[in-house]
Amino acid sequence: MSKRAKARLALRSISRALGRAYRRLSALKPSPFVVAIIAVAAAIFLFGGGIYDLIMNPVVYIPRAGAMWVTYPYTMLEQTLMESMISMLYFAFGFIGLYLMYESTKYADEPYRAWIRFIPGLLILIAAFVLGQYMLRVQKLGR
């Protein structure tokens, strides 16, 4: 068998494999819940500084005598890995609070069940906001 025939045979088998993979992927119907969770996780990763972490490879924390700093003080140009992970955690808490508040709207005919979901959701959302502001204003800017 010549080299040209072997190359055609290899390309034909690759073409068939790609065609089968395309048919399987195009027939795939993931649930909307899974798609929403993946979208929220991607947004949290991006908002928390995940791209910066991948590109810049920052230090995990700043060791000091008797303490460790998780943020670079007085600068908005750099961040540690712990700082971005903590901010991702705060964004996730905020999303959980919003989701609980959204779930409370499904129980409009049962006020007690609606309040049981709404109040913790609101408290979690406010806590995430306050903690995020604390990290930004007090730790980063020193105000």
Image (cartoon, grey):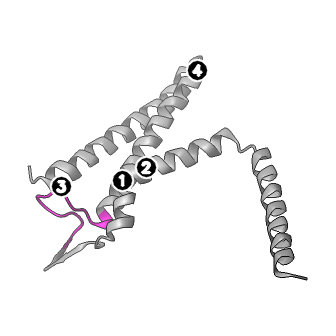
Q: Earlier in the sequence, mark 4 or mark 2?
A: 2
Could you tell me residue 20's position as x and y percent? 83, 56
Q: Residue at x 22, y 53 (%)?
A: 135
Main SS of the magenta part reads loop
**Inter-mark Cα distance, 1 to 4:** 37 Å
Could you tell me residue 2's position as x and y percent? 87, 82
Residue 88 numbered mark, or none: none
Residue 76 numbered mark, or none: 3
Could you tell me residue 121's position as x and y percent? 44, 36
**Inter-mark Cα distance, 1 to 2:** 6 Å
Q: Bin the neighbour count of mark 3 within 10 Å (Cα to Cα): few under 14, some 14-19, many 20 and up.
A: few
Q: Badges 1 and 2: C-beta atoms under 8 Å apart? A: yes
Residue extent of the magenta highlight: 68-82
**Inter-mark Cα distance, 4 to 3:** 47 Å
Q: Is residue 131 left or right of residue 29?
A: left
Q: Amino acid at mark 2?
A: Ile
Look at the numbered disc 1 and give the secondary structure of its residue. Answer: loop
Q: Amino acid at mark 3?
A: Met
Residue 44 numbered mark, or none: 2
Q: Earlier in the sequence, mark 3 or mark 2?
A: 2
Q: Residue at x 81, y 50 (%)?
A: 23
Residue on which disc 1 sits: 48
